[in-house]
């Protein structure tokens, strides 16, 4: 499976309506701590925009709602994975991306036979407090060998100046939140990401 090199992560259907029409081809809907009913309506609205623009949508955490809503891709962290029914996710035909932050988590992730593996945080991130020190670029190369032939997603503290490094070290896709959502010009920054990742597409 091939992933687009630009992996946008946002926390609402509003963001997806705003940014996906600019040419984003891979987006994660990462909404935290909301009732299933709200998640469901966000997934529906976001899913319509993504379908209209040939953009792959990945639902974070809420795998049961994603199955019920006919989505085709979910992302889970290690705690999410431990609580999830992976057989049900597979039986419903969904693809699965998994987070990893250390060797043990990589073993666990590979054993679950995911469709991609994410490694983070590559650089310091302001999005959430993390238990792990930044991994650094060299870790991407180590993961590249372990994860092959699956796609490898780099995440954490990425910006347009850091793309060359993450792809040169073997990432297939660069995931980003705040470099875009906290930017003074999110649309302009999204266009910059699209242009700068084009050579790895
Ligand atoms: C592409 C990608 N990589 C990592 C994560 C983090 O997932 P998780 O560890 O479950 O943390 P939350 O995002 O759920 O807070 C991700 N969402 N996407
Ligand atoms: C959810 C997550 N998992 C590892 S780093 C990270 C946050 C990424 O956000 P940003 O791109 O703003 O650093
Ligand atoms: Mg999670």
Image: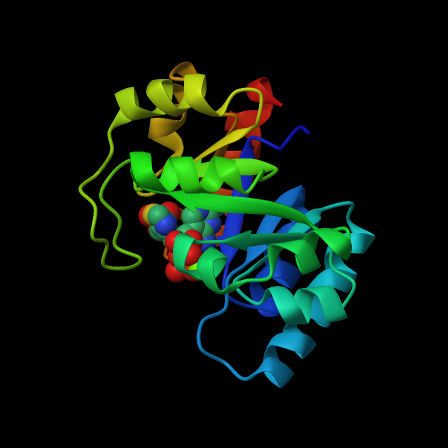
Please state which of residues 36 and 86 is positioned toward the viewer in this rendering.
Answer: 86
Image location (x, y in percent) of residue 56: 70, 46
Residue at screen point 35% across, 24% down: 140
Indicate left or right for 143 with 35 as reference: left
Residue at screen point 64% across, 69% down: 64
Please state which of residues 48 and 149 is positioned toward the viewer in this rendering.
Answer: 149
Residue at screen point 37% across, 57% down: 182
Q: Is residue 24 visible?
A: no
Residue 69, compared with residue 121, is above or below; it is below
Which quadrant is home to the C terminus? top right
Residue 11, compared with residue 9, is above or below; it is below
Image location (x, y in percent) of residue 179: 37, 47
Image location (x, y in percent) of residue 116: 56, 36
- Total numbered badges shown on the rendered structure: 0
Residue 199, compared with residue 76, is above or below; it is above
Which quadrant is home to the N terminus? top right
Q: Is residue 94 visible?
A: yes
Indicate left or right for 79 with 51 as reference: left
């Amino acid at each position: 499976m091939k992933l687009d090199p630009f992996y946008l992560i946002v926390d609402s259907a509003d963001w997806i309506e705003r940014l996906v029409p600019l040419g984003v081809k891979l987006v994660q809907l990462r909404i935290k701590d909301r009732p299933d009913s709200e998640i469901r309506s966000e997934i529906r609205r976001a899913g319509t925009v993504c379908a209209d623009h040939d953009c792959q949508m990945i639902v974070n955490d809420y795998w049961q709602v994603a199955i019920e809503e006919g989505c085709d891709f979910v992302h889970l962290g290690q705690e999410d994975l431990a609580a999830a029914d992976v057989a049900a996710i597979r039986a419903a035909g969904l693809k699965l991306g998994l987070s990893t932050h250390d060797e043990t988590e990589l073993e666990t992730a590979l054993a679950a036979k995911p469709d991609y593996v994410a490694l983070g945080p590559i650089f310091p991130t302001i999005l959430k407090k993390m238990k792990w020190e930044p991994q650094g670029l060299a870790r991407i190369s180590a993961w590249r060998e372990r994860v092959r032939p699956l796609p490898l997603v780099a995440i954490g503290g990425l910006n347009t100046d850091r793309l060359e490094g993450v792809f040169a070290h073997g990432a297939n896709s660069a995931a980003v939140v705040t470099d875009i959502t906290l930017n003074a010009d999110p649309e302009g920054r999204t266009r910059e990401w699209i242009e700068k990742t084009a050579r790895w597409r």
